[in-house]
Image (spheres, grey):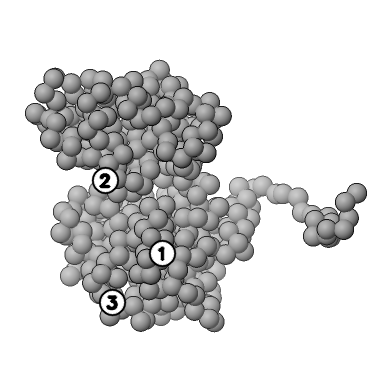
Amino acid sequence: MHCDITDPTLAARGRDRIDWSDAEMPVLAGIRDQFARERPLAGLRISACLHVTTETANLMRTLRAGGADLVLCASNPLSTQDDVAAALVDEGIPVFARRGEETARYYAHLRAALDHRPQITLDDGADLVSELHKHRTDLLGAMLGGTEETTTGVIRLRAMAAAGALRYPIVAVNDALTKHLFDNRYGTGQSALDGVIRATNLLLAGRVFTVVGYGWCGRGVAMRAKGQGARVIVTEVDPLRALEAAMDGFDVMPLVEAAARSDLILTVTGDKQVLSWEHFEVMKDGCIIANAGHFNVEIDLPALQSLAVERRRPRAHVDEYRLRDGRRIRLLAEGRLVNLAAAEGHPAAVMDMSFANQALAIAWLRDRAQPLAPAVHPVPRAIDQRVARLKLAALGMRIDRLTPEQTAYLASWEEGT
């Protein structure tokens, strides 16, 4: 299979946008300079399954600077930015992706990425790892490891590990503090609302906005919606997170109660069918529903379709379903990641840290003298702290250091006064 998009005009536009993002990614740019000097990934075959965005393009440039032999495919059918794909192909990095591709083509692209016979996989949602374990077990013996970018993927991989099915080690980049505290919270918080607003031109101030799930992504969405003047409701199944949402000043209630009050509902749970027929049946006329979780399973689309008597598309990323009683429910971005399907995804400044973790974790996997067990592993603390230090330096900020006496005191159990 050949790369999908080869268009010089599109590629030129993509390069301009990639370079714009690069200016907001100083940590990754510094790692790229180091990689270019040291070539820590020389000859390493990498297959990456990520959202094909400008930020991802800068990660691909960084891995190539380190000497990697890499290919890229999309991790979502609606997240690919075609001009970025064309630019990377023009620069000699194979890309198998096209925005809006059908499911069959999406999986054909996953298989094309595995045809590269990778030694390391780089995933966002674990589709590449899953496909490899199901259909390309002949490649498992050569695997050094992999990395996983998102919460949903880490959940899938931990389930594989618990079942004894995971055959090579994966580093959970998502769980690095410099990833999930910033990318998940501030990145999703801003980009999900950006997608909603671009799709609808909706004024959030004064609207009832329900956030389904109060993990780090949900926290960010709730915070930003509140900042826009929305009246925010949080729904949860975890009592600790529900209590935290209440202490953070949000109304907390069951989703079926929130659905009857809401002007807009956004799911961000990583689970399936969290918004279904019992919620559709009580929604107000004109309620807008959207998803910021990785897969398009959080909204029960078959249930919505079964309740509808008519469907129309009044705006580019809005499908309006009219129910038998005349009520209209407006679905954004076909239930897929609204921040990428209807907007551009996370800002480059926050992806800077996430992709710095990716690049350094891949080099760490390559450098290990002893292989890791086939399990989900944390990002080494030294990498996490290095990324934080580099980001602070890029922002022109300095912090204090402990004196030797203070360090010794914290390590001692004898001195209490």
Q: Position of residue 328 (x, y in %)?
A: 19, 24
Q: Amino acid at mark 2?
A: Val
Given residues 60 and 404, the one toward you in this image is 404
Question: Quick check: 415 left or right of 376?
Answer: right
Q: Which residue is mark 2?
A: 297
Residue lying at 50% horizontally and 55% vertically, measured from the top left: 175
Residue lying at 37% horizontally and 41% vertically, measured from the top left: 268
Task: State the residue lying farthest toward the left.
Answer: 309
Q: Position of residue 93 (x, y in %)?
A: 32, 67
Q: Which residue is mark 1?
A: 162
- How many numbered callouts? 3
Assess disc 2: are there few (<14), some (14-19) or many (≥20) residues with their C-alpha within 10 Å of its C-alpha: some
- Label 2 to label 1: alpha-carbon separation: 23 Å
At numbered mark 1, what does the secondary structure look like: helix, strand or loop? helix
Which image quarter: residue 142? bottom left
Q: Which residue is mark 3?
A: 137
Q: Amino acid at mark 3?
A: Thr
Which image quarter: residue 263? top left
> Tag 1 or tag 2, which sits nearer the N-term?
1
Q: Is residue 146 above or below residue 355?
A: below
Quarter in which the N terminus is drawn: bottom left
Question: Quick check: 92 left or right of 399?
Answer: left
Q: Amino acid at mark 1?
A: Ala
> Tag 3 or tag 2, which sits nearer the N-term?
3
